[in-house]
Image: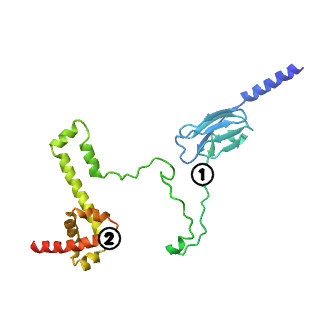
Amino acid sequence: MTRLLLFLAAITSFQTFGQSETLKGKILADSLQGYAINIVNFTKEIGTTNDGKGFFEIPAVVGDSIVFSSVQYQIKSVVVTQEHFKKDKITIVLFPVVQQLEQVKISNVQLSGRLDKDVGIVELQPFVDNQTLGLPFSDKPQPTLIERRIYTAKSGIIEAPINYLNGTIKKLKRIKALEDLDKLVQQGERTFTVSFFTDELELPENLISDFMYYCAEDNQYENLLENPERLVLLEFFKEKSKAYKAYKEKE
């Protein structure tokens, strides 16, 4: 008797599966082209995917649950009804998954707009760099463009002798010397205000840079710029201004 019941149940199950119809449909979604949606008949544990235009076909009967899923779209589940089979194809609309951003914390600190007052109430984060993290670091300044060009010209077994012979390295060194001189002149101009050169030294404003080039010819000039005692540099400029004026009068 038990065997008979099992046999009848198997036949019924087989007939039910054999009576499955083909459910046809089309998926509508933003930017669907190129994406395959997982279409699974959850009841029968069979699945398929859509084609490039969104069309699909899957075996199903009334009452089956069809699940449409994808990483970029929200999951949609449909229970098959008789009305679905009366249509040439059903339409399944999928909506994109909305990515929720992390909560943004807004400070409740009321600022006055005055830096000297606000700096005391704002919590400052510690500065983090390679050194504070215990990572390898170098405080050596990066080479300038002309320094890199000189290094390249002097490198190489074949290139180096050629660049020495054709004067390339000598030319690059002259350019570097001019760049270094310009830096010294600019540094000197920044040591004091324009009024110091025009009022104290009585130099025309348009000749301040020329005066700096004149001072840069003195070997003491570069060392004095690095000297934190600005009074020594001030006296140097005063003495040099006298010689500079005399020089300009002879021109």
Residue situated furthest left in the rendering: 250
What percent of the width, then of the height, locates residue 157?
A: 24, 36
**Secondary structure at numbered mark 1:** loop
What percent of the width, then of the height, locates residue 243?
A: 16, 72
Say which residue appears at 62% left-offset and 44% top-offset. 91
Task: Identify the amino acid type marked 1.
Answer: Gln
What percent of the width, then of the height, locates residue 132?
A: 50, 53
Quadrant assignment for the C terminus: bottom left
Q: Earlier in the sequence, mark 1 or mark 2?
A: 1
Along the line of sight, which residue is nearer the eye, 121 or 250? 250
Say which residue appears at 21% left-offset and 76% top-offset. 204
Q: Is residue 157 left or right of residue 123?
A: left
Task: Identify the amino acid type marked 2.
Answer: Arg
**Which residue position is annotated with label 2?**
230
Up/down of 83 relative to 234, above or below: above
The label nearer to you, 1 versus 2, is 2
Q: Residues within 10 Å of mark 2 (few under 14, many from 20)?
A: some
Asked which quadrant contains residue 201, the reply is bottom left
Q: Is residue 113 visible?
A: no
Quadrant assignment for the N terminus: top right
Say which residue appears at 20% left-offset and 73% top-offset. 241
**Which residue position is annotated with label 1?**
99
**Secondary structure at numbered mark 2:** helix
Along the line of sight, which residue is nearer the eye, 164 or 106? 164
Which disc number belongs to residue 195? none
In 3D space, how far apart are the residues under numbered discs 1 and 2 (Cα atoms)? 60 Å
Q: Is residue 37 left or right of residue 3?
A: left
Q: Residues within 10 Å of mark 1 (few under 14, many from 20)?
A: few
For the rendered model, the colour scheme is: rainbow
Asked which quadrant contains residue 26, the reply is top right
Say which residue appears at 79% left-offset and 24% top-offset. 10
